[in-house]
Every structure is written in structure tokens, then in C-alpha cells.
Amino acid sequence: MNTLHLTNTQSDIERAAAILRDGGLVAMPTETVYGLAADALNGSAVRRIFEAKGRPMDNPLIVHVADFSDIERLRLVSEIPDKARALADAFWPGPLTIIMKKGDVIPDEVSAGLDTVAVRIPSHPDAHSLLLTSGLALAAPSANTSGKPSPTTAKHVINDMEGRIEAVLDGGACSVGVESTVITLVADTPRILRPGIITREDIEAVIGHVDVDHAVLNKLENNEKASSPGMKYKHYAPKARVILLRGEDEKYITFVNRRYARDKSVAAMCYDEDKSQINAPCITIGAMNDEVAQAQALFDALRAVDELGSVTTVYAHCPRATGVGMALYNRLIRAAAFEVIDLPGKRIIGLTGQTGAGKSMVAEKLREMGLPVVSADKAARLAVEDSEIKAMLCAAFGDVLLPDGTLNRKLVAQLAFSTPEKTAVLNAITHPKIAQLMLKEAEACDGDAVIFDAPQLFEAGEDAYCDIIVGVLAQPKLRMERIVRRDHITRDQAALRMSAQFGEEFFLSLCDDILYNNGTAEELDISVKELYERLVGQ
Ligand code: TXA
Ligand code: MG
């Protein structure tokens, strides 16, 4: 099938209307997103929408009409509640969808077997013309392939639907950018099923208290039933993995930059103001305090992720979940498959360095000076006591538990350090847990700055949480002597250990501050005091 590309001239709108009256599919612009329209009262036309989108049949559609009187005239609903009239007066035509008890004319394909129907009067002039010209009620979900971000331009629609539908009506970019707010009036208390640009507060100002469905902000458990079937599906997701970072803007920027320093396949989805400070490729979604602009840009931004090429992970700054932010949060958390990283509220000082350089001594001295120290080694020991981690280790390395259920550490070490690939498997399992335990301990510490004492700060990805990173370095000759003395091993064994670690260049390029420990104990005391001044004097 060739998809016709129509403009919004009256003659093209008449062509589109004719296609719809014949049971065809037309993608139409609305103020929210493009909709994929068919005659709502023609079950077989509606069925084709599901085929074109690859949409599960149990996900009901919104019925669009030109005017409030059409709802009664066409008997779309069995009863119009007073609150529906009040909401219609306040927000229609506009980006609000109201769920009511359905009328008998609604085909099962539209309601997906429910006894309710979703109705909306769009404000976009082209949608309005098409509704008027066709004289139809139009069932229209967003015109994307199921699971992808909703389309906000005709080009997005063409990318997804070319050859699958009769026509696309190009009405330019959608002004709202996220789909309508969906509210059900069928429940005892009106309940928002999907947040949009019309906020909870806007609605409450008209009809009083409304609930927000649990699934708007939370992941549904496997056995939980979705009030709005659309909420249970993976949605809005680009091919790259999206991860939300929740925390202060500076922490967000630092996190992304540190990850990018180690991994060139990461990118940022950030605010306009962040861009100049972020080293990774950026997709901006608008000014930090302009949630309306962010909503408009969001889906285009999510689609743009896949055009960045080799990007595997995108870090997006987690929006607040109130006001218009609730709509942004609801879409982004689904794009991220609910993966959120909480950035620490405290200042984190990373302390790392080469073996034998004296990092532990420096950590101990800083602790004595009053800075709490969180040890990565201690977290690593705790991490492997976690039952989930133990199960993952058994899945990767076979039965590695002792008869009492604790981990056979020796066996794991033997298996995991046999090849670099197996070491990477071990690290992928334990590192995120270790970081999580360290962050938890940091939050529980007194004061607002905490030291992360971590020999593998960079390898384990703990660096990204650090506001400042200090590397402790020393000459190889001195380190060799210290290791031999400390661990009672031969010089050859010490040399082997040293060669397995990163060299000085590595630390110089990634650390923000360097402490050289090449002198006497007294000299070290002075260096640590000076470091302390630099760290807390700022
Ligand atoms: O802004 C919009 O609402 C766009 C434009 C085209 O109008 N349409 C749109 O449709 O976003 P769609 O199908 O992508 O999303 C409709 C949502 C789905 O999550 C669906 O499950 C829910 O509304 N829904 C529709 N009818 C429902 C009903 N009777 N009960 C509960 N949820 C319903
Ligand atoms: Mg949709």
C-alpha cells in the first residue's frame, strides 16, 4: 500500500475524510500527538488500527468527536455524569480524555471488551476539520508502532507507518507533545489513569479531589491488574537503555561526565542549561524550569536517541513527579523500564590509588580528622552475603555455596579470576550491589561529606557518584617495598600485582586531586592535612 502524504488544505482534508468513510486509516495531527484514526463505529476498520500498530487487542482506544453534542447524538456513552460536563466546560476542546460507561454502539474492538469508553474532543484545527468533514466519531490511538514513543510530527508517523496506512495528514509539530490526560469517572472517586499537560491540580480546581492511579508513578507487580491496559506495556522506549538519575543537577552532570570519561557509548538527555557542561553527546529537552517545553520535546528526544548511532545507554535527569512533571515522569520512567539511580544527597569524596601507595593510611588519617569513611572492601564482603547476589553467582559459576549456605569465596575467586571474561562476569554481578551498599552507608553517616575508600573506584563505577576524586600515588620502588613488607610476599609476586593495576597516567587523567606519598611519615601527615584543607575548606 502506498501511504498518501496529505496537507491540511480543505481538498486534502476531504480526501482524508473519504478514506475514513470507506473504512481506511488516516494519521491525523492533534494538539497532543498524532493519532491513527478510523471510523470508531466500524469494528473492522478499527481492527486494522491494531494491525498497523502491532497493538495488543486488549488495549482500548480513545473516541474523538468534534463537539460535545456528538457524544449524546451518537449515543457513545450510556450516561453523562455531571463531572464530565464540568470537565468538558473547562477543558474541551483540549488534551483531556474522559472515561465513561459506554453506549451500545461502541464496537468491542474500541472498548477492548470493557464496559467503558474513553472520549476526547481535540482542539487541533486539522483534527477538528477532519472530524467535521467526515461526520464521523474517530477512534485514534497514538500513531506510533506499539511500544515506541508517540509521534509528534508527520515524519515520526511516516517512519513508523509508511506502507501500513492509507494516508498521513501533515499538520506540523504537535504543540503539547505528550498524550492527553486520561481520567475515569466510572470509579467512585474520579481517578487519573494517565497524566498529561492538564494537571491533577487543574482538574481538582474544577471537580474537587481526584485520585492518581497507582500505576501512573509505579511499576505494576506481575499479579496487579491495570485500570488502564495501556499502562502495563513497555512504552516509549528507544533501542538504547534509558536510565533515570534522580538528584541535584550538579550531581547529574558529574555522574554523566564521569561515566562518559570511561565509556564513550553513553549519552545524556538533559536540560538546555546542562549542555555546555556535559562532555557526552547530549539530547536537550528544553529549559530546566519549563516543563511545558520539555513535554513538547520529549518524544522527539526519545526518538533522536536511536539516531545517535553507537549509543548504548542514555542518562536522563529524572523530573519531579508533580504538576506537568508528573506527565514527564510517567513517560520517562516507562522509557527507562523503571530503572532509576538515586544520586547521593551528600558530598562524596572518592579516595583511590595504586596498591602500596598508602591509600588506606590516608583514609585512616582523614577519618581521625572527622570525615566518615565508607570502605568498598567492607561493602564487597557484605555484597556476597546478599541472597540475590548469591543466586546470580550460582547461576554464573555453578554451585558455589558452602554447606551452611554462605559463599565459598575461595572457589568463586578461583573460578572468576581464571579468565578476564569470567572476572567481568563476577564484576557485573557484584559491582552494582557494592555501590548500592556504599551509598546506603554514606546516607547513614554523620555530616554532609563522606569518603569512599575504594581501590577499584573506577572499575566498579563508584567514581560516578563522587563529587571529587583523590588519587594516592607513590613511586613504584617505594610501593614494591611496602607491598613486600605488608603482605609478606616476594618481590616477583609484588611486581605481578603491581603490573595488573593501572599506571600513574590513568589516575592523573581521571582524578581531580593527587596526593603523592613518596616521603616520610611526617611528610605524609602534612600532605594529608593539606588535602583535608582542600577538601573541606572549599
Ligand atoms: O492525546 C491522546 O490521548 C492521543 C491522541 C491521538 O488523542 N491518543 C492516545 O491514545 O494517546 P492511546 O491509545 O495511545 O492511549 C490511550 C490510553 C491507553 O493507555 C488506553 O489503555 C487508555 O487510554 N484507555 C482507553 N480507553 C480506556 C478505557 N475504556 N478504560 C481505561 N483506559 C482506557
Ligand atoms: Mg499510545
Image (spheres, rainbow, N blue to C red):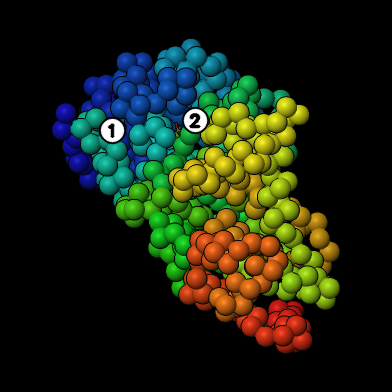
Callout 2, which amino acid?
A: Tyr
Residue 481 drawn at (x, y percent): 63, 73
Query: From this viewpoint, which residue is outermost toward the left?
Result: 2
Q: Does 382 sit left or right of 125 as displayed?
A: right
Q: Mark number for residue 233?
A: 2
Q: In the rendering, at what x and y percent does residue 225 appear?
A: 61, 22
- Quarter location, residue 165: top left
Whole-angstrom CA distance, mark 1 to mark 2, is 24 Å
Q: Nearer the viewer, residue 464 or 64?
A: 464
Left or right of 98 in this view: 410 = right
Q: Nearer the viewer, residue 395 or 180?
A: 395
Looking at this rendering, what residue extends furthest in the top direction? 104
- What amino acid type is highlighted by mark number 1? Val
In the depicted view, which residue is nearer to us: 95 or 153? 153
Tell me the quadrant of the picture where the C terminus can be found.
bottom right
Q: Residue at x 50, y 44 (%)?
A: 418
In the structure shown, which secondary structural element does the residue marked by tag 1 occupy? strand
Q: Is residue 361 above or below residue 188?
A: below
